[in-house]
Structure formats: structure tokens, C-alpha cells
Amino acid sequence: MQVCDVHCHFFSSRFLEILAKDRRDIAPGDHAAVVSTLLGWDPPGPPDALADRWITELDRHQVARAAVIASIPGDEESVAAAIARHPSRLVGFFMLNPAAADAAERLSRAIGDWKLRGICLFPAMHHYRLDDERVTATFEAAAARGAAVFVHCGVLTVGVRKRLGLASPFNLRLGDPLALATVAAKFPKVPVIIPHFGAGFLREALIAADQCPNIHLDTSSSNSWIKYHPGLTLEAVFRQALEVVGADRLLFGTDSSFFPRGWQRQIFEQQKAMLDTIGVPAETQEKILSGNFQRLFA
């Protein structure tokens, strides 16, 4: 059965440089090497080399294709280099802050010149409302270029920020799937992806997806947010998502990110076992594990 992963982070050298730029204890130009050492990661190296390593890793686990995310505004070019090197295997996503002064310019270059195909919004991180007119402008650009919009809702923790002692003043009230449904409904041709089943806002994510046929849910990460729902199990989450949203709008993901950890096979094995346990037919599993990805990002 083919596997495609809709949620991998491309933690490049540039990502580490931007992330740690306010660390005054690290000399300018040394951020990537120093931060890699602090985190116990392998240094990412140039984008081409990191892209090649991802392909080797995907081959090792027999993963056909993956979406790789430029995980901080300003790192779009690293992912652009990766997909230019491996266009049949990697799909480029990038984080955009639509409230930033240069958002329109970054957006145009990323989905125009560099052919990136997923715009990632983190409203809780960047402090804007999902019904903001600048979000609407982002959807308009996505509609014009055939791009998808990936919107992180619910609880948000960034492990690398914690480990580096960086502040994370997130406003979780801004990541509401019901607010996302308002703008998604205006752009029915734009595929919208909510990761982690809504990351604690499962009910709201299901309501939003039930109202908007263009909203998809990704299954990525350990989904540890279920601890906020007493008695809830991942098996129950899959059952409810299949019942409400349907198999055609579920996308498998792992939330893989850095090396040497690499692709998180245990996430795949856990979710595959879950689908087997609840009796999901093979042809339906294939939609979730690869078919829907291939349809959205042909």
C-alpha cells in the first residue's frame, strides 16, 4: 500500500538561523551549527543536501511522496530548492504570517516564482484572526494559483522553541476551526487542511469540515491533545472523523522534522494498526494513506 506524508517539517540551516537570531550568546553566522549541537541534531547543511537526505529517508521507509514545510517565515527559498531538486517526490509548503508587512510579496514569490503548493497559517503564533481581511487575501491568492491552505488550530507547542528557551506567547483563542470555516466557505475550490484533527478542537474541526466540503483533516503526530478529552481514545477519533468527514478528506501525516530521528515510522505503524483494528477496508485506507494526497497534489 502506497504511503504519502502530508506533514513534514524541513528544518533547514536557514530555519535555525532565523529561529535563534535573538540569542545574543551565539555569534551571527554560527546559529545553524551551534543550535544543532545544542539540540543534539545533525547539522542540516545546504538545502540540496537536506533534500537528498529526506529522499534517502523516504526511500528507506518506502514513502512515495511528502509535503515539506518551510517552518518559519523567511525560509521559503530552502524548500523551493528542495522541491526543485526532487519535484516528483516533494511538495513545498511554507509558513506565512499574513499580518506581516511583506506578506503579499512573500506570498506572490512563493506560490508564483517558486511553485510552492501549500500556504501554512498559524494564527495563534502570529496573533491575527482567521476572519481578518488579510487571511481572505491569502485565500484569494491560493484560489488564483491552485494552492492549498494549511491552518494550525487548537493547542500549539513548538518543542524546539522550548528547548532553546525561546518565548512562545501564543494566543490559542485565535486558532478556532469555526472561524476558519467562515473564510473556507467563501473559497470552496481551495483545499483547506487542519492538522492533528484540530489539536484539541476535534468537535469544532468536525463541525467546520461538515459545513465546508473543502476542509480536510490531517492525522499527524502523536495526537497527545486527546489528554484534554477525558476518556477519548485515538481509535474513537478515527471512528468519528470517518463518520463525519469521510475517508476522502483525511490525510495521513507524521509531523516528522529533524535528523537523526528522521521519518517517524512509529506514527505510521500506530495509525495503520488503528485503521486495521476498526476494520477500515484496504481501498479506504489507501485513500487516507496516499490517494487523497495524490489527488490534491497531483
Image (spheres, rainbow, N blue to C red):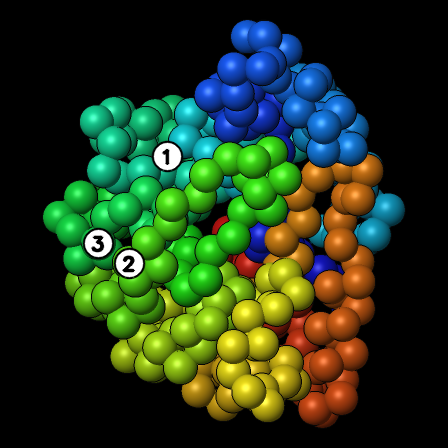
Which residue type does callout 1 highlight?
Answer: Ile
Q: Which residue is mark 1?
A: 111
How far apart marks 1 and 2 lie (CA) works out to: 25 Å
Q: Is residue 269 left or right of residue 287?
A: right
Residue under the image location 32 percent in, 38 percent down: 97
Q: Position of residue 176 (x, y in %)?
A: 31, 66
Which residue type does callout 2 highlight?
Answer: Leu
Are the residues at dot 1 and dot 2 in contact (C-beta closer than 8 Å)? no
How far apart marks 3 and 2 lie (CA) works out to: 6 Å
Is 18 in front, or is 93? Answer: 18
Is 63 in front, or is 129? Answer: 129
In the image, residue 34 above or below residue 259? above
View extreme (top): residue: 28
Numbered circle sitting on residue 290 = none
Q: Which residue is mark 2?
A: 174
Please rate how many residues cluster around mark 1, counting C-alpha atoms within 10 Å: few if below 14, some from 14 to 19, many from 20. many
Q: Is residue 11 left or right of residue 73?
A: right
Badge 1 marks a residue whose secondary structure is: helix
Q: Position of residue 108 (x, y in %)?
A: 29, 29
Please rate how many residues cluster around mark 2, counting C-alpha atoms within 10 Å: few if below 14, some from 14 to 19, many from 20. many
In the image, residue 178 above or below residue 141? below
Q: Earlier in the sequence, mark 3 or mark 2?
A: 3
Q: Which residue is mark 3?
A: 129
Q: Position of residue 262 (x, y in %)?
A: 77, 44
View extreme (left): residue: 133
Please rate how many residues cluster around mark 3, counting C-alpha atoms within 10 Å: few if below 14, some from 14 to 19, many from 20. some
Is 24 in front, or is 6? Answer: 24
**Camera sees residue 247:** no
Residue 105 lies in what quarter of the image? top left
Badge 2 marks a residue whose secondary structure is: helix
Q: Position of residue 295 (x, y in %)?
A: 51, 60
Residue under the image location 70 percent in, 82 percent down: 275
